Amino acid sequence: MDAVIAIQEVALACPRSADIVQAGNFGAIRTFVEYANPEQKKRFLPGLLSGRSLMSLGMTEPDAGSAVTDLRTTAEKQESHYVLNGSKIFSTHSPEATLFLIYVRYGPGVGGIGSVLVERDTPGFTIGEASSFMSGEQWAPLYFESCRIPAHNVLLGPGGFKKQIAGFNVERLGNAARALALGRHAYNTAREHALVRKQFGRLLCEFQGLQWKFAEMAVKLDAAQLLLYRAVANAEKGLPAAYETAVAKLAANNAGWEVANEALQIMGGTGYSQESLVEYCVRRTRGWMIAGGSLEILKNRIAESIFERRFDQRSG
Ligand SMILES: Cc1cc2nc3c(=O)[nH]c(=O)nc-3n(C[C@H](O)[C@H](O)[C@H](O)COP(=O)(O)OP(=O)(O)OC[C@H]3O[C@@H](n4cnc5c(N)ncnc54)[C@H](O)[C@@H]3O)c2cc1C
């Protein structure tokens, strides 16, 4: 809850700076802190928390996006080492990251999945050419070719997948907090604009068509905010519940994007220009509808709670 409030308050002043609160609290670092042993924490946490090093999450693969359990990057035990083979895509901040939390397969099935820690300069680990997301954040493909890592770099062994996803629900709440915060930043900026900008001899805020837009935006933000607080408050004693997290992220991702997009429209050319951060808020909030569990995958998860059964998405 402290970190959610910090993200939201920082984003009100500077949407970009909220990423720093995320990186230190909710990203891959949160899964690491949840499951790392004392020796791993001693080795990596001081650098990560001081900002000297940065962690990137390698989960997605070219053929394993939403179907993340189809991942093929293998970790094979050889004496006191594990040998990694495979590749990852879309790992945010991978061009600059110093440490990588990589989802791997020790054996077949969901039960064969776990995760390891890979340091940047490990032989057999190559970071490909950087690409940019629409948000401006960069990612690079990661390649593992007979990459040997010491056994003490295993974070979660076989059977770790469920734990990883439980930890990932915390990241989802950070994602939801930023989506809402950036929506609110755009809303505040548009509100200030509507209070001073005149057309047809009247202030924009005097046109009922725009007043109704603001009313709708306020309701979307407030509703999603309460759903986010429910998930976060109930998670205070452990990890967030999957259903409440999915509902909160879905509501916050939709509200953040819709409000930022509407704020841009209200501000006309000024909103579309890089002079304000509203266009940035639109670009950023769009990505969170895909990252960290797309809207569709969240709805699948919510439906499973509604019907109290699993719906296998695989054919045959
Ligand atoms: C901004 C951003 C940051 C990211 N950062 C990271 C990162 O740091 N580390 C990392 O590992 N990955 C990261 N990703 C990757 C992200 O996890 C994947 O993009 C996401 O899981 C979706 O996979 P995909 O892109 O392959 O789409 P696909 O899985 O190919 O899906 C395509 C579309 O089909 C829909 N779809 C798929 N299956 C179903 C279904 N069963 N029912 C209904 N609809 C379905 C999806 O919702 C989506 O709209 C990031 C992505 C973005 C956009």
Image: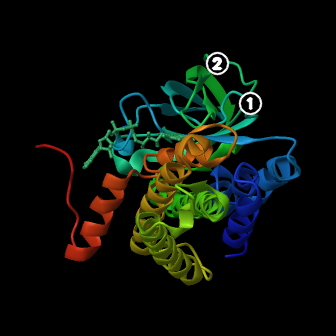
Residue type highlighted by circle 2: Gly
Q: Residues within 10 Å of mark 2 (few under 14, many from 20)?
A: some
Residue kind at label 1, given as amino acid type: Glu
Residue nearest the observer in this picture, 49 or 83: 49
SS at mark 1 in the image: loop
Would residue 121 be visible to someone looking at this image?
A: yes
Please tell me which residue is depicted at 56% across the width and 50% down the height of the picture: 267
Q: For the C terminus, which image quadrant?
A: top left
Q: Is residue 62 above or below residue 203?
A: above
Q: Position of residue 65 (x, y in %)?
A: 39, 38
Q: Is mark 2 within 8 Å of ligand 1?
A: no
Q: How many marks?
A: 2
Residue 303 in the image: state x and y as whole percent.
25, 67
Which label is found at residue 96? 1
Query: Taking the image as four quarters, which one is ligand 1 found in?
Result: top left
**In this rendering, position of residue 303 left or right of residue 290:** left
- Furthest-left residue in this view: 316
Residue 132 location (% of width, % of height)? 58, 27
Residue 20 screen position, x and y as percent: 76, 52
Q: Is residue 79 visible?
A: no
Locate residue 211 relative to residue 307 in the image: left or right: right
Cβ–Cβ below 8 Å for labels 2 and 1? no
The residue depicted at 57 percent of the width and 35 percent of the height is 91
Q: Earlier in the sequence, mark 2 or mark 1?
A: 1
Instruction: Report helix, strand or loop for mark 2.
Output: loop
Q: Is mark 1 within 8 Å of ligand 1?
A: no
Location of mark 2 (residue): 124
Q: Residue 61 falls in which quadrant of the image? A: top left
